[in-house]
C-alpha cells in the first residue's frame, strides 16, 4: 500500500490562540519566536453556493458559521438551490430568517404533479411538477425589482435553452430585472419545473453546465473565494437502482454534477479558494429533509474548514477558533492518498486526472508523487476515475 501523508500547522492541545492569531502556551505565555505579522484581510471575499436540490438547505448552516466566525462576505454567487439561499443572504436576511423560508417549503405544496396537463398533452408538456407556487414563494421573499436593491452584490447563473449559453444574472445588462425571476431560472431543474421565460428566451437550472460557479468569482476579482460544493459522495456506497423516471433523472443529474465539478475545481480552485464539502450525499436530491439537521451538518462542516484552512483561519474570531481547536480531531487540510499496488494496473489515468500532480508517471507505473499534497481539490476525481478501485482518498 502506497500512501502519502500531509500535515498543516495546528495548535497543540495545550496551546491557546492569542488575539493576533498566534499560538500561546498552556499558561497563556507566548513561545519564543518571531513576532507574527498583522492579519491582512482580503479586499474582496466572494461566497459561492453550489447547487444540490434540497441538500442546498445546508447552505443556511454555512451562513450561520460565517456569522459566528465574524467573516466578512462582500459578494455572493449562487446556482440552483444555492441561488435561492444566496439571494436571501444577499438581501440581508440572517441565517435564522433564511431557515424560516426553508421551513415554508413543503414537498406536498411546491412539488405538485401536472397530472391534468399530462393527461391532455402527454410528453408535449414542459415539466413533471408545477413551478408556479415555488415562483410565488420566491416573489414573496425576494420582492426586489432590480439586483441593485440587494444589500450585497449577487449573481446567479442559468442556462439558455435557445442559445445553449450560460447567463449570469446580476452582471451589467442582466441586473435590471426581478430577482425572483432570475433565481427561479437558476433553480429550474429541466423537466421538473417549467422553464423561465425572460425576454424572448427560456432558461433552466444553471447547474446543468456549472454547479459551483467559481468562474464568476474569479471574474469578479475575488481575493478570497469560499466555495460550498454539495457534490461530495461516498464512492464506496452504491445507489440501488429503481425503475422509475424520477430516480433515473435525479441520479443522472447527480452524477453529471459530480463530473462537472471535477473539471470546474481543477480549473478554478486555486490558492485563493477555500472549498467546503458538507457531507449530505446520503440525503435524496428532492426529498424534504429535516431542516434543523441539514443546517447543523452545513454549520459543522463550515466551522471545521474555515477555522483550519490557512486562507480563513486567521480571519476568524480567535475565541471561536480556540473553541473549535478543542473539537476538531485533525486538520481538514490533511489529505491521505492511498494506492493498493496489488490492484493497480499502472494505466496512468490517475496521473492524467489529478489537477495537483499527486501522482507521477514513472517507468514502473504510476505512483503517488507528493508526500506533502496540500493542494488536493477534494473532488475525488482520481478515485472516481480509477478503473480498478485501487485508489482511496481519506479525510475528504
Image (cartoon, rainbow, N blue to C red):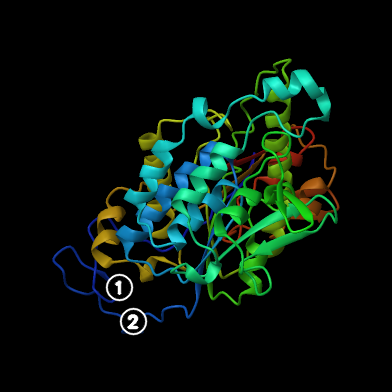
**Is residue 315 rendered to the left or right of residue 159?**
left
Picture layout, residue 10 above or below residue 140: below
Q: Nearer the viewer, residue 149 or 340?
A: 149
Q: Is residue 362 visible?
A: yes
Q: Which mark is residue 344?
A: none
Q: Residue at x 66, y 43 (%)?
A: 188
Q: Residue at x 78, y 30 (%)?
A: 125
Q: Is residue 394 visible?
A: no
**Is residue 3 rendered to the left or right of residue 242?**
left
> Do tag 1 and tag 2 residues touch (Cβ < 8 Å)?
yes
Q: Which residue is mark 2?
A: 36
- Determine whether the residue tagged by mark 2 lies in a helix, strand or loop: loop
Picture layout, residue 238 above or below residue 360: above
Q: Residue at x 82, y 54 (%)?
A: 362
Q: Residue at x 55, y 67 (%)?
A: 146
Q: Position of residue 211 (x, y in %)?
A: 66, 50
Picture layout, residue 268 above or below residue 289: below
Image quarter hosting the N terminus? top right
Q: CA distance from mark 1 to mark 2?
A: 7 Å
- Determine whether the residue tagged by mark 1 lies in a helix, strand or loop: loop
Task: Please tell me in which quadrant of the rendered image residue 31 appears.
Answer: bottom left
Q: Which residue is mark 1?
A: 22
Name the residue furthest top: 243
Image quarter hosting the C terminus? top right
Amino acid at each position: 500500500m502506497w500512501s502519502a501523508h500531509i500535515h498543516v500547522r495546528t495548535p497543540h492541545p495545550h496551546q491557546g490562540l492569542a488575539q493576533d492569531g498566534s499560538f500561546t502556551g498552556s499558561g497563556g505565555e507566548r513561545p519564543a519566536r518571531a513576532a507574527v505579522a498583522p492579519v491582512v484581510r482580503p479586499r474582496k471575499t466572494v461566497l459561492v453556493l453550489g447547487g444540490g436540490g434540497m441538500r442546498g438547505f445546508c447552505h443556511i448552516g454555512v451562513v450561520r458559521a460565517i456569522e459566528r466566525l465574524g467573516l466578512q462576505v462582500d459578494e455572493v454567487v449562487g446556482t440552483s438551490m444555492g441561488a435561492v439561499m444566496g439571494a436571501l443572504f444577499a438581501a440581508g436576511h440572517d441565517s435564522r430568517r433564511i431557515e424560516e423560508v426553508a421551513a415554508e417549503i413543503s414537498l406536498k405544496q411546491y412539488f405538485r404533479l401536472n397530472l391534468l396537463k399530462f393527461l391532455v398533452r402527454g410528453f408535449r408538456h414542459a415539466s413533471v411538477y408545477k413551478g408556479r407556487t415555488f415562483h410565488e414563494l420566491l416573489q414573496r421573499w425576494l420582492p426586489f425589482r432590480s439586483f441593485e436593491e440587494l444589500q450585497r452584490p449577487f449573481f446567479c447563473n442559468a442556462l439558455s435553452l435557445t442559445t445553449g449559453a450560460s447567463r449570469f444574472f446580476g452582471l451589467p445588462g442582466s441586473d435590471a430585472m426581478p430577482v425572483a425571476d432570475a433565481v427561479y431560472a437558476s433553480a429550474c431543474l429541466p423537466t421538473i419545473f417549467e422553464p423561465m421565460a425572460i425576454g424572448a428566451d427560456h432558461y433552466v437550472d444553471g447547474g446543468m453546465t456549472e454547479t459551483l460557479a467559481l468562474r464568476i468569482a474569479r471574474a469578479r476579482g475575488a481575493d478570497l473565494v469560499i466555495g460550498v460544493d454539495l457534490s461530495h459522495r461516498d464512492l464506496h456506497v452504491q445507489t440501488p437502482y429503481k425503475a422509475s423516471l424520477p430516480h433515473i433523472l435525479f441520479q443522472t443529474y447527480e452524477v453529471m454534477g459530480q463530473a462537472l465539478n471535477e473539471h470546474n475545481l481543477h480549473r478554478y480552485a486555486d490558492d485563493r479558494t477555500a472549498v467546503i464539502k458538507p457531507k449530505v450525499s446520503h440525503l435524496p436530491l428532492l426529498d424534504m429533509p429535516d431542516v434543523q439537521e441539514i443546517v447543523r451538518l452545513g454549520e459543522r462542516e463550515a466551522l471545521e474548514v474555515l477555522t483550519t484552512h490557512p486562507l480563513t483561519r486567521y480571519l476568524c474570531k480567535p475565541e471561536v477558533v480556540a473553541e473549535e481547536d478543542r473539537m476538531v480531531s485533525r486538520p481538514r487540510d490533511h489529505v491521505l492518498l492511498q494506492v493498493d499496488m496489488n490492484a493497480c494496473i499502472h494505466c496512468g489515468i490517475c496521473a492524467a486526472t489529478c489537477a495537483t500532480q499527486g501522482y507521477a508517471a514513472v517507468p514502473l507505473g504510476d505512483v503517488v508523487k507528493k508526500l506533502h499534497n496540500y493542494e488536493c481539490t477534494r473532488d475525488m476525481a482520481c478515485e472516481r476515475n480509477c478503473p480498478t478501485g485501487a485508489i482511496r482518498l481519506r479525510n475528504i
